[in-house]
Structure formats: C-alpha cells, structure tokens
Amino acid sequence: MATNAMLIDLPRCTGCRGCQVACKQWNKRPAEKTEFFGGPGYQNPADLSKDTWCLVTYNEVKRNGRFEWVFGKKQCMHCEVPGCISACPVGALEKLESGPVIYHKNKCIGCRYCMLACPFLVPRFEYSSWNPYITKCTFCADRQEAGEIPACAKACPTGAIVFGERDELIREAQRRISQNPSLYVHHIYGLHEAGGTCLLHISSVPFEKVGYITDVPTTPMVKNTETAMKAIPAVMLGLAFLLGASYRLRNRPGLQEDAAAAQGEK
C-alpha cells in the first residue's frame, strides 16, 4: 500500500485558518481564547494544545528588504518510523500502513514517554482533566479509511495543502522548487527529518524563521528511544533488588531487639 502524505506549500497560505477550524469541527474540539490582544496579526491560540491539533502560525519575517507575514502549519508530522511508538511501553500508539500515527486511549497509562520522544513536540497532555489522555492530530485516519481526504486539506481554499501519495508529493515539491527557485527555500521539510515524515513542507523563508524545529536528526528517533526503553527493565530490576535488600536488612532477625536494647540503655 502506498503511504499517504500532505504537501504544505507555505507561500500559498493566506492565514485564513480554514484548516484549523475544519480540524476542530471534525474532531469535535472546542475553540480556545487567545492570550494576545494585539490585533488580527496574532495567532490563536499560542501553540498546539489538547484541543488544537492543527495550528496556523503567524510570523512576521523580513524578506527581500521588507517585512511580510509568512504563515506556518503545526501538527503531528506522522513520521515514517515514529519515535513515539517505540517509546510507548503499552502500545497506545500505532502506525497505520496508509500513513497516520493513531492513538488508542484505552491502552494509555499516562506515562507521557511519547511526549519526550517526539522531536517535533507534538503530543499534548490533558493536564486539566481528572482522567487525562494524550491528544494529537490523527491525520484524519477515520476519513481516509472512508475514502475521504483530511479535513484540513479539504477546507483549504488556496491549494496550500495537497493530499496524495508521499512519493508523488515529493516529486511535486521538487518540481515547484525547481520551477521557482527564487521563491522557495531549496529544502523539503519532512523529507529526511526524523527519518522522513508524511507531512512535507516547502517555504519561501528558512524554516526556523517560521518556528519550525530544525535541529531534528535525519535518522529515525527510534534509535534513541529503543536504547532508553531497553534500559527500563534493567533499571526496574535493579531498583527492585535494592528495595528488597533494604527491606531484608531493616528486618533481619535480631535487628529490632538490638535497637530496643540500645534505646533502653539510653
């Protein structure tokens, strides 16, 4: 099966937030109040959250000698080899063959290892809930299964979001960059980051200027998370041994009698 992906063409984005609204509507997530009061140029909310899985970011960037608004799009990148999955000790996250990384909350124990393993800082925790879960973009896996495209892609009025097969979208991104080299940075974000992702971005300015995390290794994060997860059994075994030894030491025969005798001598 071909892996599905989305190409995000940032120069085509007008910041309308149609994708953000469509994501909330489809996933039944409530609106959030902005922390800013400076006018229409500020994004709402400030960052991804338990209720905002797709976020249009507003960035005022100097380009060609003048300042202009450049918009970004933050959401789960749906890595080809997800570090969050390898970090989860209970299998609460799953990579589908079609591309999406989905979450099974009935399996989650709330350890939040996935949050530590994600190089893009995507998964969010429901800190305000008495029964908290992890939340994040699902790449509209339910819509894809029904033969539909993701809600954000369907809502985009300018063609800034294109849904299709990953290999085809890589070729399309390369074509756009080669045909207009003065407009685009010569880099496809997501092509190699974290071993490759299903969200591919092209931009008119360096990605760090629009808030993208650019120090992501090109190798899958699973190499790091597997090392850490393999150490957990040994650490837990060592901790159990130390606690057991401490208990036996504190309760060895004659220890309490000796302590009582010493207390009586005082």
Image (cartoon, rainbow, N blue to C red):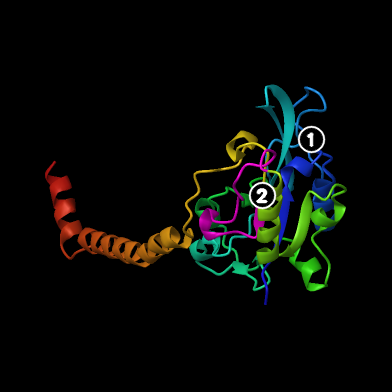
Which quadrant would residue 226 be assigned to in this image? bottom left
Question: What x and y, as percent, mark residue 75?
Answer: 68, 50
Residue picked out by circle 2: 178
* Along the line of sight, the residue nearer the viewer: 250 or 97: 97
Q: Quadrant of the N terminus?
A: bottom right
Tell us which disc is closer to us: 2 or 1: 2
Is residue 77 on the magenta stretch?
Answer: no
On residue 261, which mark appears? none
Please tell me whether mark 2 sits on a helix, a strand or a loop.
Answer: helix
Residue at image position (71%, 23%) is 67
Give the extent of the magenta segment: 181-201
Q: Which comes before the other along the chain, label 2 or label 1?
A: 1
Question: What x and y, as percent, mark residue 3?
Answer: 66, 69
Which quadrant would residue 6 be assigned to in this image? bottom right
Residue at image position (61%, 50%) is 188
Q: Amino acid at mark 1?
A: Lys
Q: Main secondary structure of the magenta part?
A: loop
In the displayed image of the protein, which residue is found farthest to the bottom?
A: 1
Which quadrant would residue 107 be assigned to in this image? bottom right
Asked whether residue 133 is in view, the answer is no
